[in-house]
Amino acid sequence: MFSFFKSKKKKVGLFLSGGAVRGIAHIGVLRAFEFFKYPIDIIYGTSSGAIIGSLYCAGMKPEQLIAIMETLSMREFVKFKLSRQALFSSEAIQLFVEKHIGKVTFRDLKIPLGVFVTNILTGKAELIRGLDLDVSSYVRASSSIPGVFTPTTLESKTYIDGAFGSDQDLNTFDCDIKIACNAISEKPLQIIPKTIPELVDRAAECLMISKGYYQAHYYDLQLNVIDQPMSSIDLKFRKSLVEYGFKCIENNRKRIEAIL
């Protein structure tokens, strides 16, 4: 049963998608990886996946992440700024990350981390891994959802949420086994979105679902963590999201162990 541990060690990369609040499901994924003693040699995160990934790579355990999410309020991510670009300042995301892990560089992390951002001029995704770069700044950039959070300018480049960029050129990763966890449900909605935020949210979901299809060949295994549509901003299902993440890994143990 545990013969997969005896083979030559391969470097495992775990890819965590965006999804705003739904990214909380990635905590359950990480909890399951630890529970079943599956290795994680590097994490690649996008948007909320980058937020969760940065905290974990800095040394926080899943139980600590769960404790943070249990008391989390959307007010922590709401910093009003008079701007024609967005409703809120993306600085709140950076402050949230620094509150929990400090102002650290990628070199300081206990587990290597790669963060996806979208260059607003080229429309292409960029993978950030520079050892001397500031983690919280690039996690902020990766999570700068257009229209919601202001774009983030770093090193003379302006970035928006990493989920929005074309990443077909990003086909080389520092791992042998690539496991992707998608926190956006592919199930159809039961109710048509009625408000502007709901419509914008659904448009982003449609983009991420379509990207998931063409990105499938990147990975050795791509898992859909959430099996039903859920709000991107409603925290009332936070406990369920963690359970979704754990159950996804638990239910796919044979598939995971077959490639480790």
Image: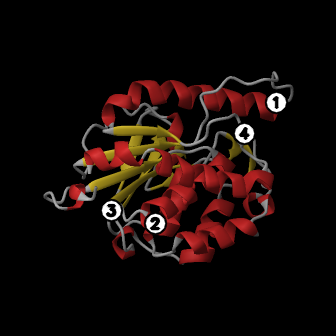
* Residue 194 in view (yes/no): yes
Compared to 24, does 83 lie above or below?
A: above
Compared to 201, does 138 lie above or below?
A: below
The kind of residue on which mark 4 rests is Met
The residue that mark 1 highlights is: 196
Considering only order in the chain, which callout, 4 or 1, is on the residue closer to the N terminus? 1
The kind of residue on which mark 1 rests is Ile
Do the residues under discs 3 and 1 have CB atoms within 8 angstroms? Answer: no
Element at badge 1? helix
Q: CA distance from mark 2 to mark 1?
A: 41 Å
The residue that mark 4 highlights is: 230
Element at badge 2? helix
Residue located at (78% from left, 23% from top): 190
Q: CA distance from mark 1 to mark 4?
A: 17 Å
Do the residues under discs 2 and 1 have CB atoms within 8 angstroms? Answer: no
Along the viewing direction, whichever of 12 and 34 lies nearer the viewer: 34
The residue that mark 3 highlights is: 39
The residue that mark 2 highlights is: 35
Considering only order in the chain, which callout, 2 or 4, is on the residue closer to the N terminus? 2
Q: CA distance from mark 3 to mark 1?
A: 42 Å
Q: Nearer the viewer, mark 3 or mark 1?
A: 3
Along the viewing direction, whichever of 84 and 182 lies nearer the viewer: 182
Q: Nearer the viewer, mark 3 or mark 4?
A: 3
- Residue 48 image offset from top left, x and y in percent: 58, 52
The kind of residue on which mark 2 rests is Phe
Q: Residues within 10 Å of mark 4 (few under 14, many from 20)?
A: some
The kind of residue on which mark 3 rests is Pro
Q: Nearer the viewer, mark 1 or mark 4?
A: 4
Determine which quarter of the picture holds residue 166.
Answer: top left
Considering only order in the chain, which callout, 1 or 2, is on the residue closer to the N terminus? 2
Q: Is 98 left, or right, of 125 in this rendering? A: right
